[in-house]
Image: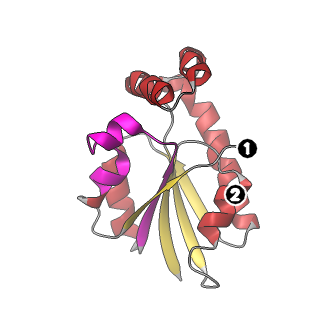
Amino acid sequence: MFTSVLMIEKPLVPTDVELITTLHGEDPVSFVVLMQPHGDQDRLLRALDDVALGELDEAVREVGRPEGEDALPPAERALAHSLEALRAAGGEAVGQIVEEHPLDLLKSVVEQTGADEVIVLTAPHLVEEFFHRDWTSRARHKVGVPVLKLYAHTE
């Protein structure tokens, strides 16, 4: 069985589920999903990304999004939804909320599970990507398995 560690920031939508569950054809896939809740330190970068992408209404909404401890319940719901969607599509799926440094957790999960790859499924983060400070760029230097960057869809 092929094992993928999937890093996400929001619930998977059907298009994302179809994409990641069909990447390896008919081979059975097991997913370990790491859900990253919103953090206070990311607010400015997310707003800058929204402005750079021309999504000014999203930049304004950053102020109202839950942060820190308040972001845990929505992240838990998003994780549960995503796990159910992956299982419904025929994959095995387990997951957890990222409560420590994401890349340290990612490395330990890859080592513990013997994962074959990491898939980072996020919205575009233009500022972080430009400076190679996004999860994908940093993970490629840390985990020792291929890291695939995919952009999450919205409904």
Q: Quadrant of residue 100?
A: top left
Q: Quadrant of residue 76?
A: top right
Which residue is nearer to you in this view: 103 or 60?
A: 60
Residue 7: x percent and y percent? 48, 53
Residue 10 lies in the magenta stretch? no
Spot the residue most to the front: 54
Which residue is nearer to you in this view: 68 or 63?
A: 63
Residue 143: x percent and y percent? 29, 63
Per the rendering, the mark at residue 15 is: 2
Q: What's the coloring here?
A: secondary structure
Disc 1 marks which amino acid? Glu
Q: Residue visible at 57% across and 27% down?
A: 55
Residue 141: x percent and y percent? 23, 59
Per the rendering, the mark at residue 77 is: none
Q: Which residues are magenta?
A: 117-139
Spot the residue most to the right: 88
- Is 67 on the left or on the right of 130, as rendered? right
Disc 2 marks which amino acid? Thr
User: Around disc 2, counting alpha carbons within 10 Å, would you say few (fewer than 14), some (14 to 19), or many (20 or more)?
Assistant: few
- Is 62 on the left or on the right of 78, as rendered? left
Reading the image, the residue beneath label 1 is 155
Q: Residue visible at 36% across and 53% down?
A: 136
Above-or-below relation of 31 to 37: below
Q: Residue visible at 51% across and 79% down?
A: 2
